[in-house]
Image (cartoon, helix red, strand yellow):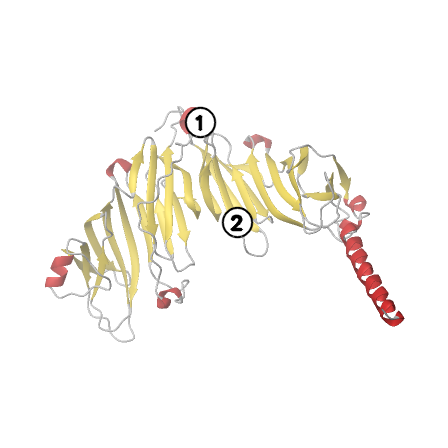
Amino acid sequence: MSKLAMVAVTVLLMVSCGESLSAQERAGAPTLQTEADEYTQYELLAPDTASFKIFYEVSATAPGAKVFFNPIRKGSIASDEAVYDAMTGEPLHFEVVSGAEARKDPLMADADAAGSYIRIQLARAVPPEGRGRLLIVKTYKDAKSYYRDGDAIVFNRGLGIKRNSVVLPQGYELIGCSVPSQVLPEPDGRIAISFMNPGAGEAPLMLRAKLGAQTGPTAAPRPLTGSRSWEAPFPGETERHRLAERAHQDRDIVYFLQQPETHAFSLYHDYTESRPGMDKYLNVVREGSTVSGPSAYVLDTGEKLATQLMTGAELSAAKIEADEPVKPATQIVVISFPPVKKGQSLRLRISETYAAPASYRLEGEELVFDRSLGRPRNAVVLPAGWYLTASAIPATVTQLPDGRVRLDFWNGRPDSVDVLIKAKRRNAPSGKPL
């Protein structure tokens, strides 16, 4: 090898080693703290304490970091802190420091000097492209976030973490939830909500709850099974339907569940007809359901409309075409109205009562409503005397003036939502189910 070639190789090796060393140095000396995989669970303690216990899962991601700083929220008084290494379960050393002290660490050059932080010694340095997983436990007292309002309790807190759960105290039922959330029972029967916030900014969560839920062994949920939904798998929609604007679609529906022993629910659904010449609306009853008591009127004028219950065979004999295939025994509700004139429209409200044992039933002491809902806007109202224990699909929750609980499911996707709701009987003031 010539001297010139040897010099070139030497230079390349020096550059390569220098780049490798530089990368290692960068990994060993992180600039600012970063994190990932954040999830928080809030357990609401006795209301008069204005306190809640927090379980915060987080991963430190700055390569080479040996410490992690967790801010203490302003306005909250922290106590009972503990920190664990998620890999081993071992407790970690930590201390509470001021924001000014935190700023001395290069990781926290942008720390709030007026704030306070929990400084945690990690079990091991964060490896390159790795994570240092932590569980941080603490109790906050914050009367502005957690308080009584008449006979209700309120948890009113903007949550910046994107994945969250809040567990109500024993004996409290959920009567209000401002952020679409799953509702799930804890093993001991306490009610929890859970949600993900994919958007920018905090989730403005406001929960309201009242006494009325069962306590003790009867509050525990029925063990879950491996059974699947009775509904057929979603077949998919046409391109026309998938690319239609969901926010402007005018179909919405509200279900009013009757007592579960009846397997019955009444409903109304609203629909705007604007196609010139259309003079009827066909509501095809879903297989497994039977319909009774149909009625309809024009929302714009209050005019009552004629309704007729037909079978698929009768529809075919009358040479009335449906927008979808119907079997001879299928029930169809036909609503007739004056032909729509060009440039005009009619807003219809159609009311019916359905019986659907597969969809709506009582399993032991639990109410179960299991039904696929296809509208962009859907709502379900529980029967009187029942409190919500589970909702598989995220919903907002409100309480009607008569005490019944309403769930709203707004679906911005071009598919159905497979709603699964469970409920239990409310406790009377004596502590026994109503």
Q: Is residue 164 above or below residue 325?
A: above
Quadrant where the N terminus is found in the figure? bottom right
Q: Residue furthest front?
A: 1
Nearest to N terminus: mark 1 or mark 2: 2
The answer to whether 357 appears left or right of 201 in the picture is left
Q: Is residue 279 above or below residue 309?
A: below
Name the residue carrying label 2.
196
Would residue 400 be seen by someone viewing this image from the given angle? no
Find residue 25 and report its horizontal and vertical position in percent: 80, 53
Compare residues 339 and 223 and report the one nearer the observer: 223
Residue at 42% x, 39% y is 390
Report the number of discs: 2
Compare residues 288 and 102 and report the one nearer the observer: 288
Residue at 86% x, 67% y is 6
Amino acid identity at mark 1 = Thr
Q: Secondary structure at mark 2?
A: strand
Find residue 102 and report its horizontal and vertical position in percent: 78, 45
Find residue 250 and report its horizontal and vertical position in percent: 35, 62
Residue at 42% x, 24% y is 217
Compare residues 83 and 310 and report the one nearer the observer: 83
The answer to whether 402 appears left or right of 74 in the picture is left
Q: Is residue 323 above or below residue 101?
A: below
Name the residue carrying label 1.
215
Quadrant where the C terminus is found in the figure? top left
